[in-house]
Image (cartoon, helix red, strand yellow):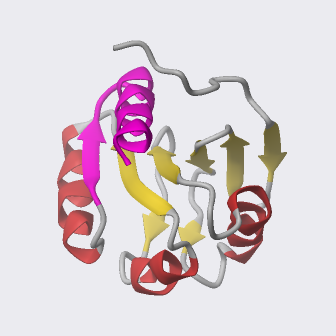
Amino acid sequence: MTSQLNRTLIKRYQLTIGTFYFYENYVVSEVNEGIALSFETSQEAIQLGKEHYGKHTPFVFISNRVNSYSFNPTSHFKTVPIFPNLKGFAVVVYDSINKEIAEMEQTFVHKPVHIFDDLSDAITWAEKLIIAD
């Protein structure tokens, strides 16, 4: 199946916590090395998500974990309700430790979550999730 979604980058934002790449129906995050990521430190990124997707445009959040950082997984409890149009999470990891962490985080998210070791596979999954909706 060939995706009908637009893979053209709409906007790239370099924030204090990392870089965010916004596309038509997905956003890719690359959090900076050493950041302590939480609901509070993510406010600027959350606001950008609201601006790009509002409450109606379906989208998938892709966390491309190219750097080492800490994350409070209970932040999902606060973030997910803000976006009723969020269809799922993809997590891209590059080692076994981060895969185990991502597997543990899945228990905090009540949306489809999939773990990948390749960004392009995560994007393909996100597109299929959007098309299936």
Q: Is residue 122 left or right of residue 7?
A: left
Q: Is residue 64 left or right of residue 125?
A: right
Q: Is residue 14 left or right of residue 69?
A: right
Vertical relation: 95 (above or below) 16: above
Vertical relation: 24 (above or below) 44: above
| Residues drawn in magenta | 112-133
Q: Is residue 107 left or right of residue 8?
A: left
6 or 93: nearer the viewer: 6
Picture coordinates of residue 34, whole percent (x, y): 56, 59
Vertical relation: 17 (above or below) 27: below
Residue at image position (55%, 70%) is 37
Picture coordinates of residue 45, whole percent (x, y): 71, 64
Q: Does the stretch in magenta take in 33?
A: no
Q: Does the stretch in magenta take in 129?
A: yes
**In which quarter of the view is residue 10 placed?**
top right
The N terminus is located in which quarter? top left
Picture coordinates of residue 89, whole percent (x, y): 39, 54
Residue at image position (35%, 24%) is 121
Picture coordinates of residue 108, whole percent (x, y): 27, 76
Tell me if residue 3 can be seen.
Answer: yes
**Label tally:** 0
Tell me if residue 92 can be seen.
Answer: no
68 or 104: nearer the viewer: 104
**In which quarter of the view is residue 110 placed?**
bottom left
Residue at image position (62%, 56%) is 57
Residue at image position (19%, 41%) is 96
62 or 65: nearer the viewer: 62
Query: Of helix, strand and loop, which mostly describes the magenta segment?
Result: helix
Name the residue furthest top: 2
